[in-house]
Structure formats: structure tokens, C-alpha cells
Image (cartoon, rainbow, N blue to C red):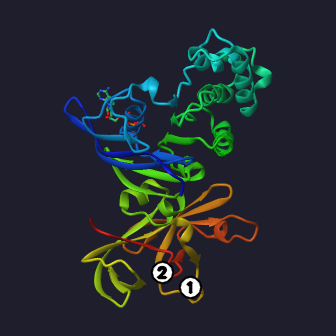
């Protein structure tokens, strides 16, 4: 991993005597695309505001390359923010919008021209430099906001829900562009979103937050495949959860009871009393006949609904105990899934090791 750029150490922030951030500890590395992900109100924007210096923490430290910067004013922090609203100057041309920061710094004119042209080329807007913001689309305005920020060569770029105003298709395109731009620039991006799909597809690492606390930090794959707790598991994608009682744990094998069914699953984790088995919808295999079920890890249920989603099909199945679960299958010409009759009996099984086991906190 690259060098540490920022460290947030035991950072706490209260608003009106209510704790909003509770002991945030986070390292941010040079050149990474780091995403703060969490539900509305969990404190993501507050972290950005503290880092940028718009607010002061109640306690804790913000460290930049081993120096405490708690008392350094925003304009001296070499941090730029791209807001959701882009905050472009409406009366200025695109060129002048991008040039603004450099003009403030009294950069020589010919240098400004060169830097702004470079930045606009990078975001593929050089042909539009004479236009005003309202003459551009939402996606283009977003790119102007990024060009305006990167032209200042910040140490870190903070992006607060900066794709959320765009329509679905443009948003998907911008996600790819933004990630590519970040790689090309090599600038550290701290991106805020409440959209898990966006976080998974763009980030080098994700920080999952809930109620002012960090629940887990990891790569998208770690967060998705090995969530640390139920909150993370359910926030990142769909998950079928089965509460089980631990009957025995020996030699890396755990015996778990779910109603009358006993599962024997491998586990390196040592857990006590209860354990949740978590299975992602796409990890269930579906069969009509028991003899086609290839492992002992299966449930029986009745098909309640079929939801066609284009590339996948969701099968909503009610288990014998009344629990509703989702199994997701890729849709292709040979796919059986659309042919299943509502009300038919189905077996849902999974391959050993595809489950996640979560202890109770
Ligand atoms: N200046 C303020 N005064 C009082 N309360 C505030 C202030 N700023 C934020 N809050 C509260 O702090 C909490 C966290 O807000 P924050 O904007 O950091 O959340 P967020 O995770 O970014 O949410 P969203 O995704 O909705 O933007 C919220 O409950 C919010 O109402």
C-alpha cells in the first residue's frame, strides 16, 4: 500500500450536544479511491467538513503526513471539495470557472492558460471552454467542477454525493469516467455516497458507516464477501439471514441448528451460542428435485413469485418455517427459472464455504 496521507484519530463531533461522530479512526493513503458509505445522516459529510477544515472536531486529531492540522484554516489545507450541487459560478465561462483558484493564487496568466487547458482536455471539455455552465449538461457541469478542483493540484479531492443529481445512465457513465480520471491524476479521492453499488464499483477501499461510527473498512470484495456484521451484510446488497443455534464447534467444524435442520459448516471463527448464516441470493442454487441437490446445505420451500430483472431472475421462495428468501439466477435461453410454476416445491442449496457466518455481538 502507498504512503499514509491523512490519519483521523479518535475524532468526535457533537452538534447541539448530540454526538454525530463517535471515535472515528481512519487512515487515508496516497492515490487511493476511498469511499465513505452509509445511510443518510450517519455522518459522512461531517467527516468531509472536518477534513476540509469547515468545522472543528470536539476531540481527536486530524493528521496530515504526521502533522496535526486541527488548527490549520481551510484555505491552507490543500484540500478541494466537489459538492453535490457543483457550485459553479453561473456568470463565468467554463474556462474562468476552472481558472478561478489559480487567479486567486496570482498564478501567471500563461501558466493559468496552460493548466486550465490541460484540465479541460482531461475531462474532455476543451471545446466548451467559452460556454457558461447552464449551456452544459449535468454530467458536463460535474466534470467542470472536477476540473476546477484538480487544477489546484490538491492533496486530496473530497466528493460529496457528487453523482447523485445525475440520471441513472449518465451516473453509470460518470462512475467509470471518474474512476479512470482518478487513476490518471493519481490524486487521492475521498468519495461520499449512500449507494452501495456505486461504492463497490468505484472504490479501492470502502468505509461503511452507521450512526456516527465506522462498522467496517475494506476492499469492495472484502466488504461484500466477508461482512463483519449484519448491518454491513444487509447494507451492501441483499442477504438471506438464518438465525441458528450453535450445537457444537470442534476442529474447525460447526454444527448449527435451524428449526429441525442441522448444518455442519467449516468455520475458523470461534463463536458462542448463536450464529447467523448469511447467504447472498446469487449463491443459492435452485433445483426441483432433491436428487439434483449437490450438498447437504439446503432448504425446501414454495415458489411465491418470479421477478424478471433483465440479466437475472429473482425467485421469491417461502420456506417451510414461513421465512421468505430470495434466490437469484442468471437469465439465459436455457434458464429453467422462468418455467417454474408459482406454488411449486423448490430446493435451495449452496456450495460449502459460500456462506458467511456471523457471531452475535
Ligand atoms: N450544522 C449542523 N447542526 C446541527 N446538526 C447537524 C449539522 N450538520 C449536520 N448535522 C446532523 O448531523 C448528522 C450527520 O449529518 P451528515 O450530513 O454528516 O450525514 P450524511 O451521512 O452525510 O447524510 P446524507 O447522506 O443525508 O448527506 C445528521 O443527523 C444531521 O442532521
Q: 136 above or below 319?
A: above
Question: Could you tell me which residue is drawn at 70 percent across and 23 percent down?
Answer: 116
The quarter of the image that holds ligand 1 is: top left
Q: Are marks 1 and 2 in contact (CB under 8 Å)?
A: yes
Q: 299 above or below 229?
A: below
Q: Which residue is mark 1?
A: 293
Mark-to-mark CA distance, 1 and 2: 8 Å
**Front in this rendered view, residue 359 or 12:** 12
Quadrant location, the C terminus: bottom left
Q: Earlier in the sequence, mark 1 or mark 2?
A: 1
**Front in this rendered view, residue 327 or 44:** 44
Question: Could you tell me which residue is drawn at 47 percent across and 82 percent down?
Answer: 297
Element at badge 2?
strand
Dividing the picture into quarters, in which one does residue 146 lie?
top right
Element at badge 1?
loop
Question: Could you tell me which residue is drawn at 50 percent across and 31 percent down?
Answer: 78
Q: Position of residue 5 (x, y in %)?
A: 47, 45
Dividing the picture into quarters, in which one does residue 246 lie?
bottom left
Query: Is 50 left, or right, of 123 in this rendering?
Result: left
Mark 2 nearby-residue class (10 Å; few <14, some 14–19, many ≥20) = some
Q: Which residue is mark 2?
A: 298
Q: Position of residue 158 (x, y in %)?
A: 50, 35
Amino acid at each position: 500500500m502507498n504512503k499514509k496521507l491523512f490519519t483521523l484519530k479518535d475524532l468526535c463531533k457533537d452538534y447541539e450536544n448530540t454526538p454525530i461522530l463517535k471515535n472515528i479512526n481512519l487512515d487515508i493513503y496516497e492515490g487511493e479511491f476511498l469511499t465513505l458509505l452509509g445511510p443518510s445522516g450517519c455522518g459522512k459529510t461531517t467527516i468531509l467538513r472536518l477534513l476540509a477544515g469547515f468545522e472543528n472536531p470536539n476531540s481527536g486529531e486530524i493528521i496530515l503526513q504526521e502533522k496535526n492540522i486541527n488548527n490549520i484554516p481551510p484555505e491552507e489545507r490543500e484540500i478541494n471539495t466537489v459538492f453535490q450541487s457543483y457550485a459553479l459560478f453561473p456568470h463565468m465561462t467554463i474556462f474562468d470557472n476552472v481558472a478561478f483558484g489559480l487567479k486567486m493564487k496570482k498564478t501567471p496568466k500563461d501558466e493559468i492558460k496552460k493548466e486550465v487547458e490541460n484540465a479541460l482536455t482531461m475531462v474532455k471539455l476543451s471545446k466548451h471552454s467559452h460556454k457558461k455552465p447552464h449551456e452544459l449538461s449535468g454530467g458536463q457541469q460535474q466534470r467542470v467542477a472536477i476540473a476546477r478542483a484538480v487544477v489546484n493540484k490538491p492533496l486530496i479531492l473530497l466528493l460529496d454525493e457528487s453523482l447523485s443529481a445525475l440520471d441513472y445512465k449518465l451516473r453509470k457513465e460518470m462512475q467509470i469516467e471518474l474512476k479512470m480520471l482518478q487513476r490518471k491524476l493519481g490524486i487521492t479521492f475521498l468519495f461520499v455516497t449512500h449507494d452501495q453499488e456505486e461504492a463497490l464499483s468505484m472504490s479501492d477501499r470502502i468505509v461503511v458507516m452507521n450512526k456516527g461510527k465506522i462498522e467496517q473498512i475494506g476492499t469492495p470484495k472484502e466488504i461484500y464477501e466477508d461482512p463483519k456484521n449484519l448491518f454491513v451484510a444487509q447494507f451492501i446488497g441483499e442477504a438471506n439471514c438464518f438465525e441458528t443455534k450453535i450445537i457444537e464447534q470442534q476442529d474447525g467444524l460447526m454444527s448449527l441448528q435451524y428449526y429441525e435442520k442441522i448444518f455442519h459448516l467449516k468455520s475458523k471463527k470461534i463463536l458462542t451460542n448463536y450464529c447467523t448464516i448469511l447467504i447472498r441470493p446469487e449463491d443459492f442454487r435452485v433445483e426441483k428435485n432433491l436428487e439434483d441437490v449437490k450438498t447437504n446445505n439446503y432448504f425446501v420451500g414454495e415458489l411465491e413469485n418470479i421477478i424478471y430483472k433483465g440479466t437475472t431472475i429473482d425467485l421469491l421462495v417461502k420456506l417451510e418455517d414461513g421465512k421468505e428468501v430470495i434466490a437469484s439466477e442468471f437469465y439465459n435461453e436455457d434458464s429453467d427459472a422462468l418455467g417454474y410454476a408459482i406454488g411449486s416445491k423448490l430446493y435451495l442449496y449452496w456450495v460449502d464455504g459460500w456462506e458467511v457466518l456471523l457471531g452475535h455481538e
